[in-house]
Every structure is written in structure tokens, then in C-alpha cells.
Image (tube, grey):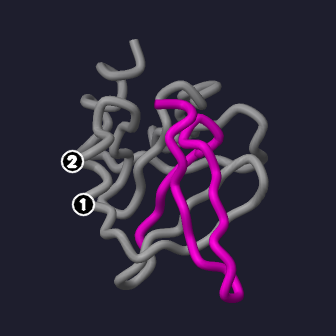
Amino acid sequence: WRRVPVGARVRGQLRLSPFGEVYCLQAKQKETVVRHRGGEYLIEDALRYLGEEFGHLFVRVHRKALVAIDKVESLDKDDTGQLFLTLRGNSGRLPVSRRLAAEVQRRLR
């Protein structure tokens, strides 16, 4: 699966990134932002479809975000009890929905 490419058209050219380089998938209107080691791009596939197809590789952390399980560095709580994921090799944190927190913790064990 790591070598299976995910592709997008960028300025008329087809760009391919292996799924093993993808950090997360985030819904943006009717498209999906693919964040990967080399940057990010938009694809037309719906996040719901990608979650169904690649759910064994990703965990839903929010209704608009899927994160690659093997890219998770840590899962931490802030002072208010809100959970956040930190991804390996990627600055920044992603919030985890309270509704999905138990499932995220279970999948990351």
C-alpha cells in the first residue's frame, strides 16, 4: 500500500505521491486536501470515500479529517482536556473531536 500512488492534477500536470508519504486527508468543500511529505494538493475524491477505501490505514480524528496511523507521533491533552495529534515530520497539531476521541485512542494503541 505504501507504493500505491495517489494522484492529482496540478497546473495541468499529473502529480503522484505514494500513499506511504501521506500524513492526512482533510475535507475542503467538495474536494480533499492531501497533505504529504512534499506539500499538499487537492483531489476530487470525497473524504468519505477515501475513509471507506483506506480506513485500515487512516483514523478519523474529525468529521473533516483522516490521519495516517503510522504518521502519528503523539496524542496529547491540553489544559481543557481537548485531545490533539502531533504528526511525525510535520509541525503543528490536529484537534481530535470529542465524539471520536475514544475510537482514536483505541486505534492508536
SS for callout 1? helix
- Residue 87 picture location, percent across and down: 65, 37
- Residue 85 picture location, percent across and down: 55, 38
SS for callout 2? helix
* Residue furthest to the front: 13
Q: Quadrant of residue 12?
A: bottom right
Query: Is the residue 93 above or below the residue 83 in the image?
Result: below
Query: Is the residue 69 above or below the residue 10 in the image?
Result: above
- The answer to whether residue 92 is left or right of residue 5 is right
Residue nearest the viewer, comparing 26 with 79: 26
User: Do labels 2 and 1 touch, CB within 8 Å?
Assistant: yes
The amino acid at mark 2 is Glu
- The residue wearing badge 2 is 52
- The answer to whether residue 30 is left or right of residue 68 is left
* Residue furthest to the top: 109
The answer to whether residue 74 is magenta is no
Q: Residue at x 35, y 54 (%)?
A: 62
The amino acid at mark 1 is Arg
Q: Quadrant of residue 102?
A: top left
**Residue 48 has which mark?**
1
Residue nearest the viewer, comparing 52 with 90: 52
- Residue 14 picture location, percent across and down: 63, 72
- Labels in figure, total: 2
